[in-house]
Amino acid sequence: MEFKEVESVAVMSCECCGLEEECTDEYIGGVRAYFGGRWLCGLCSEAVKYEAGKCSPRAPDVEEAVLAHMAFCRMLKRGGPAERVAEGMCQMLRTASGRQRRASSSSSSSSSSSSSSSSSSSSSSSSSSPSPSPRAAPAHHRAQSTLSLRFTAAAAAATCNVILLAQQKTGCN
């Protein structure tokens, strides 16, 4: 009965995304030689090889592709899922508050013009009623949108508080 020599296995952490893999010393040496001394996991190495292997005059070499991919991974790792949710909620609030400001300014100007036109048209003819402005929302719709905006703002504030508490407990900033 023959015994094969077991190669030593090391756990390596990708310098781009942080993924850990168990690899043999021989494989580690090959990866580091190809990527200029850096250790990249299988997924990141394939992405870098793809970028470096493009057949265009502006295709980056391996070192440029590694640096670009590392920058991309840093951008993705910048915030956890909770931070991305909070950023999304902030963007939603900015959008909603911008819409509300535009709606309130257009409804106040259109309501004053529609009230003056309705008084003049009702005196001239009772059968033709003025058509409402397509941008003017009924008062109950404006009240609902204001209420939902206040609720969304409260939810965003609560989410931000949860994120801050989690960062304080874990020591992340």
Image: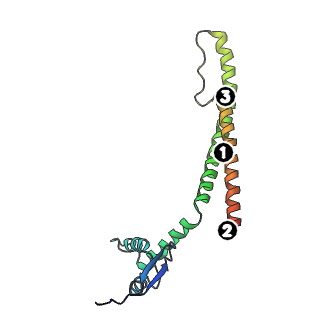
- Element assignment for label 1: helix
Q: Circle 2 is placed at which residue position?
A: 170
Task: Look at discs 3 and 2 and give the one toward the viewer.
Answer: 2
Is 56 in front, or is 123? 56
Task: Look at discs 2 and 1 and give the one toward the viewer.
Answer: 2
Ranked by sequence position, the earlier of labels 1 and 3 is 3
Quadrant including the C terminus: bottom right
Q: Circle 1 is placed at which residue position?
A: 152
Is 123 in front, or is 38? 38
Residue 140's tag is: 3
Which kind of residue does numbered mark 1 sit on? Thr
Q: Are marks 2 and 1 in contact (CB under 8 Å)?
A: no
Which kind of residue does numbered mark 2 sit on? Thr
Which kind of residue does numbered mark 3 sit on? His
Asked if residue 87 is positioned above or below residue 146 in the image, the reply reads: below
Residue 15 placement, left or right of 52: right
Q: Position of residue 17 (x, y in %)?
A: 50, 71
Q: Quadrant of residue 167?
A: bottom right
Marks 2/1: CA–CA distance: 27 Å
How many C-alpha atoms fall within 10 Å of the one at disc 2: few (<14), some, or many (≥20)? few
